[in-house]
Structures are given as C-alpha cells and as structure tokens.
Image (spheres, rainbow, N blue to C red):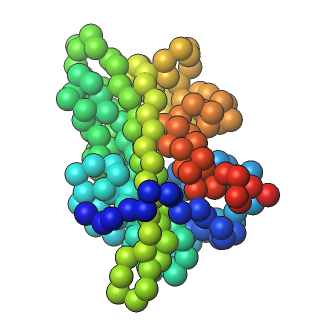
Amino acid sequence: MDARPATPRRFDGDRLVIATHNAGKLREIDDLLAPFGVTVVSAGELGLPEPVEDGLTFAANAEIKARAAAEASGLPALADDSGLAVHALGGQPGIYSARWAGTGKDFGLAMEKVHTALGDATDRSAHFACALTLAWPGPAGRDGDLETFEGTVHGTLVWPPRGDRGFGYDPMFVPDGHAVTFGEMNPADKHAMSHRADAFRKLVAACFAPATVR
C-alpha cells in the first residue's frame, strides 16, 4: 500500500479531467465544482480508454479510474465510483451497479432486475455509496499522489420508478426524510444531500477549500 502524507494535497490548478464516460455523472460533478472556477473535461471528450475496474471496493475502482485518467492526460483527474447497495440483497448490486444495466447501460433494465430480485421482501431499505478520488500524474512510469473520500445517503426503494431528472437508479430511490425520488427531485436539492455530495464535501474541505475558491 502506498504511503500517504498526513496532510492531503491541495488542488491548485484550474483544469481537471473527470474520469467518466457517463454524461449524467459528468453534469453532476461539473455542477458541484462550479463554485471553484474549475474547467472540467471528461475522459470521454478526450478519447481516453476506460480502464478495467477490477477493484473489490468503490474506493479501489475510483482510484483505478483516477490514476488512469491522470497518467493518460497529464492532468489532475477526479474519478467517481458509486452504486446502489440494497440491504435485503446483501448489498447488491454494489460495485456491480453499472453491470446490472448491461452492455447497453440500460438502467431501466437494472432497476427491473433489482425489483425482481427483491420479490416480496418487506425490507426495501438501501443506500447509495460513492468514492471520489483526486489523482495527480506522477513522473514517467510512476504513480502520482491521490486522495480518496467516501460518502453515503440512505433511503427506501419504490416501484414503479418515478421521475426523469436523475440518472442510474435515482427514479426508484427515496432518500430518508423525503417523499420524492432522486429522479423527481430538483437537482439542486439532490446535490445538497446525495452520496456524491457527501463525498464531495469531504474532498473540498481537504483539497480545495479555501485555497482554490475563486
């Protein structure tokens, strides 16, 4: 395991690669970064290949994606790995959340699979988990620094799915304390409470604020 400095490295640039080919995820991260004056470009826009995500945790997969994008682009890169953990299914689909959508990334199909797997289970509780990794390119042939932060949001699954404002499993997830799904919720309200927002607050506190706030 790499030795990490006790003090997180601060981001002091103005351009950041978002290591994703998912347009919905890019929009959400771009919105979260907007107050910091950072120009973002996606791995998809740069034509970067998607690395093999063979980690066993969200954090491990986020680190794989961030390192790959940083080294391929020569720029700092931010990667997200996130998914839905259904408690009655032993945490599935978990790190395989995107795979449940198939090669066509059909999350309508993925939600149907979750609903079918639950059957008549009375426990409909679930949580979204997110790991965010910020990585810097290192010297030739060597990994650079990276910082990883994790967040969660708990809620209940509903059927049928409701709303078209989110992405992924959002239309079937009602966060605790609310009556609408993430798919129905105003994006600004979702950004204030989501698993990604939870991880992002930790990232900002450690690596952005207050040094790079413009």
* 174 is higher (above) or lower (below) than 149: above
Residue 208 in view of the camera: yes
Residue at image location 43% in from the left, 62% down from the top? 5
**Could you tell me residue 138's position as x and y percent?**
44, 80
Given residues 134 and 153, the one toward you in this image is 134
Is 181 positioned to the left or the right of 141 in the image?
A: right
Residue 21 in view of the camera: no
Given residues 6 and 57, the one toward you in this image is 6
Q: Quadrant of residue 60?
A: bottom left
Q: Quadrant of the N terminus?
A: bottom left
Q: In which quarter of the image is residue 168?
A: top left
Find the residue positioned furthest to the bottom: 140
Is 11 positioned to the left or the right of 130 in the image?
A: right
Residue at image location 31% in from the left, 33% down from the top? 85
**Could you tell me residue 124's position as x and y percent?**
32, 17
Find the residue positioned furthest to the top: 122
**Could you tell me residue 187's position as x and y percent?**
65, 36
Is 31 positioned to the left or the right of 120 in the image?
A: right
Is 20 positioned to the left or the right of 180 in the image?
A: left
